[in-house]
Image (cartoon, helix red, strand yellow):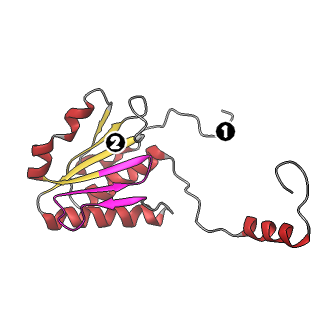
Amino acid sequence: MFWNGVSAPGKVSGIFDIIGKINIRRPNKINSRGRSLKAAEAALDKKAKETIILDLRKLTAIADYFVVCSGESVTQVKAISGNIERRLREEGVRPIGIEGEDHAHWTLIDYGDVVVHIFEDETRHYYELEKFWLDAPRISLNAKDKDSMAGEDKRQEPGRGD
């Protein structure tokens, strides 16, 4: 049926039925907070330094969360980036775009609602991205205490009547 309740003639209706049954992408089962936590965890698995999550939901429409971390070398920045992309892909989440992979002084992975910034140490200290978001609530993370990342998401999930 079309949106106005009128059925499509024969062949067209069949096409809509087929299209509706095709699962082009595995649905994302984690919300934006979960994606940011998963990205931070993947960064920490590759020994990322100064890993933080900035909660931007009340400050801008650019993204819900920024994940910011550093690597000591270009090689480490590439390893962190690759691990984040792999871990989120396992969850069915694919990036909209990736910038800076060639030189890897600052790699940006854009997931729409979550943007991951992976800096080489010197580059991070030069740009000081966090200073632009001083009002953003921060979740500071470190490799010794990964369990602290799993804080409760206070927002109500769609379809849950709790």
Q: Is residue 146 left or right of residue 72?
A: right
Measured as percent of width and height from the top left, residue 58 is found at: 42, 29
Q: Which residue is mark 2?
A: 148
Quadrant in which the N terminus appears = bottom right
Q: CA distance from mark 2 to mark 1?
A: 25 Å
The residue drawn where x is 44% and y is 46% is 113
Quadrant where the C terminus sits is top right
Q: Which amino acid type is shown beneath numbered disc 1?
A: Arg
Q: As displayed, is residue 77 above or below residue 69?
A: below
Residue type of the residue flagged with mark 2? Ser
Q: Residue 102: within the magenta?
A: yes
Question: Looking at the image, which is closer to me, 101 or 3?
Answer: 3
Which numbered circle lies on residue 56?
A: none
Q: Which residue is label 1 attached to? A: 160
In this view, the residue farthest toward the top is: 135
Chain part drawn in magenta:
96-116
Query: Quarter-wise, where is residue 138 in the image?
Result: top left
Which secondary structure lies at badge 2? Answer: helix
Asked if the residues shown at circle 2 and circle 1 are in contact, with their CB atoms under 8 angstroms apart, the answer is no
**Residue 41: within the magenta?**
no
How packed mark 2 is, by other alpha carbons closer than 10 Å (few <14, some 14-19, many 20 or more), is few
Which image quarter: residue 133?
Answer: top left
First reached walking from the N terminus: tag 2 or tag 1: 2
CA neighbours of label 1 inside 10 A, class few (<14), some (14 to 19), many (20+) = few
Residue 9 drawn at (x, y percent): 91, 66
The residue positioned 69% from the left and 70% from the top of the image is 22
